[in-house]
Image (cartoon, grey):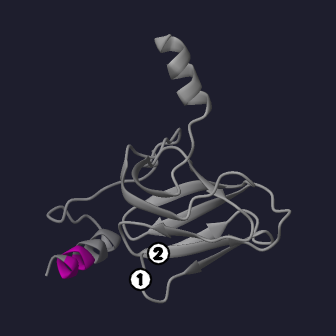
Amino acid sequence: MLFFNLLVSVCFASTARIESKYVNIGESSKIYLRPGLITVLELPHPILEVRIGNPNDLKVVISGVSPRELTLYFKNSHANITNLIVKSDRKNYVFDVIPSSRTHQDYIKISGGIGSLNSSTPLIREDSRSISPEKVTNEKDYLIKEQLMRIEL
């Protein structure tokens, strides 16, 4: 009986219309949006840039009141699934925006992100070199040292 109740609750579980959550930075999060309605997406940090997979279907507007909020809506009732990449001053967030006639999320507050981006390429190139400010060997290194010193001031 317990298994049956668990199965029924999983099968009929619904997405909360108002939600606050942490997201995994290494994976895309789902946003369910009903055509004709809006969703407000709030991030923990100010938004610098937004990129939309299909701008013909999805409209995204940064709030004029809060630089941490986005308003999302579909431009037409026959929209297709698309992705949304939001760059804040500290993290990048990736979402799949899914049109749905049954499920809708009105307000989503991202309280923070856990994890990190999965990367198969090294972040530091093999042919790159680093210098220490004390060890100046040529004019290029001297210019770099001078810039480092200016930054530290």
Q: Check residue 145 in the rendering and tell me which mark sits there, or answer none.
A: none
Question: What kind of residue is marked 2?
Answer: Glu
Residue 46 drawn above or below residue 115: below
Q: Look at 38% across and 43% down and name the residue there.
A: 115
Depth check, front residue: 94 or 135? 94
Q: Is residue 126 left or right of residue 140?
A: right
Does the CB distance between marks 1 and 2 fall below 8 Å? Answer: yes
Depth check, front residue: 22 or 141? 22
The answer to which image quadrant residue 53 occupies is: bottom right
Q: Is residue 79 left or right of residue 129?
A: right
Outermost front residue: 1
The answer to which image quadrant residue 72 occupies is: bottom right
Residue 52 drawn above or below residue 116: below
Question: What kind of residue is marked 1?
Answer: Ser
Outermost bottom residue: 64
Q: What is the tally of numbered marks visible in this picture? A: 2
Give x and y (percent) for residue 113: 38, 52
Q: Look at 36% across and 70% down and name the residue there.
A: 45
| Quarter of the C terminus within the rendering | bottom left
CA gap, disc 1 to disc 2? 6 Å
Residue 6 drawn above or below residue 41: above
Depth check, front residue: 132 or 99? 99
Residue 34 drawn above or below residue 119: below
Whether 79 is among the magenta residues is no
Whether 149 is among the magenta residues is yes
Q: Is residue 1 left or right of residue 76?
A: left
Q: Which residues are magenta?
A: 146-151
Q: Element under label 1?
A: loop
Q: Which residue is mark 2?
A: 69
Give x and y (percent) for residue 60: 63, 75
Give x and y (percent) for residue 150: 20, 82
Q: Check residue 66 in the rendering and tell me which mark sits there, or answer none.
A: 1
